[in-house]
Image (cartoon, rainbow, N blue to C red):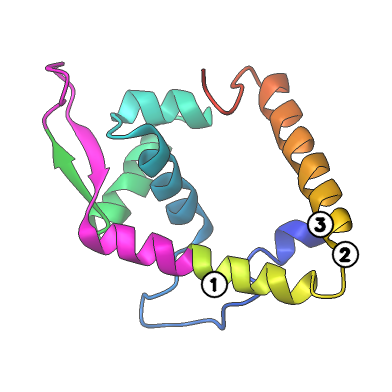
Amino acid sequence: MVLGRHQHMGAPSRRDGGELDRSAYILLSRIRIEGPMSIGQLSEAFGLDTSTINRQTGAALKAGLLERIPDPEGGMARKFRLTGEGERRLDEARATAVRGLERVLADWTAEEVAEFAAYLKRFNTDIEKRHGRPWPRP
């Protein structure tokens, strides 16, 4: 629980819309990794109702972080992809998170960091498997 509370360890709270909230960060990260995705694909990937995904993508569209495009593979559903602003903000948020982690782990040995990373990867992978959404996807 403490780890989850400190997800933005390095970022001071900003009210200018500069800091991505958790749902936007996760949404943008997934689209960056998977490539353009439809509402249905996002709903399946996150195990969330389409109305929730519609709200999240709507907020990201309004903020200029995502854009709707025709399916690059010729399908009927429109898909979402990151805009240049979405890429920039995601990179900024990731860099802030990395700086925060570096401060927390500053006194750890390289071996301790590697061991922690391995256990965290296993933990996350096992959670996703348990929910029927193995990650990373094949």
x, y percent for residue 116: 83, 50
Locate residue 62 relative to residue 31 in the image: left or right. left
For the residues bearing labels 2 and 3, Cβ distance under 8 angstroms: yes
Question: Is disc 3 placed on a helix, strand or loop?
Answer: helix
- Look at discs 2 and 1 and give the one toward the viewer: 2
Q: Which residue is mark 1?
A: 96
Give, as a three-letter code, the residue at label 2.
Thr
Is 53 contained in the magenta span? no
Q: Residue at x 66, y 27 (%)?
A: 128
What residue type is disc 3 on? Val
First along the sequence among labels 3 and 1: 1
Q: Which mark is residue 113?
A: 3
Residue under the point 61% across and 66% down: 98
In the rendered image of this protein, does residue 73 appear above or below residue 5? above
Image quarter for residue 135? top right
Q: Which residues are magenta?
A: 70-93
Q: 119 or 7: nearer the eye?
A: 119
In percent of width and height, residue 51 lies at 37, 35
Q: Residue at x 49, y 48 (%)?
A: 26
CA–CA distance between discs 2 and 3? 6 Å
Q: Which quadrant does the N terminus fall into? A: bottom right
Q: Is residue 83 magenta?
A: yes
Q: Which mark is residue 109?
A: 2
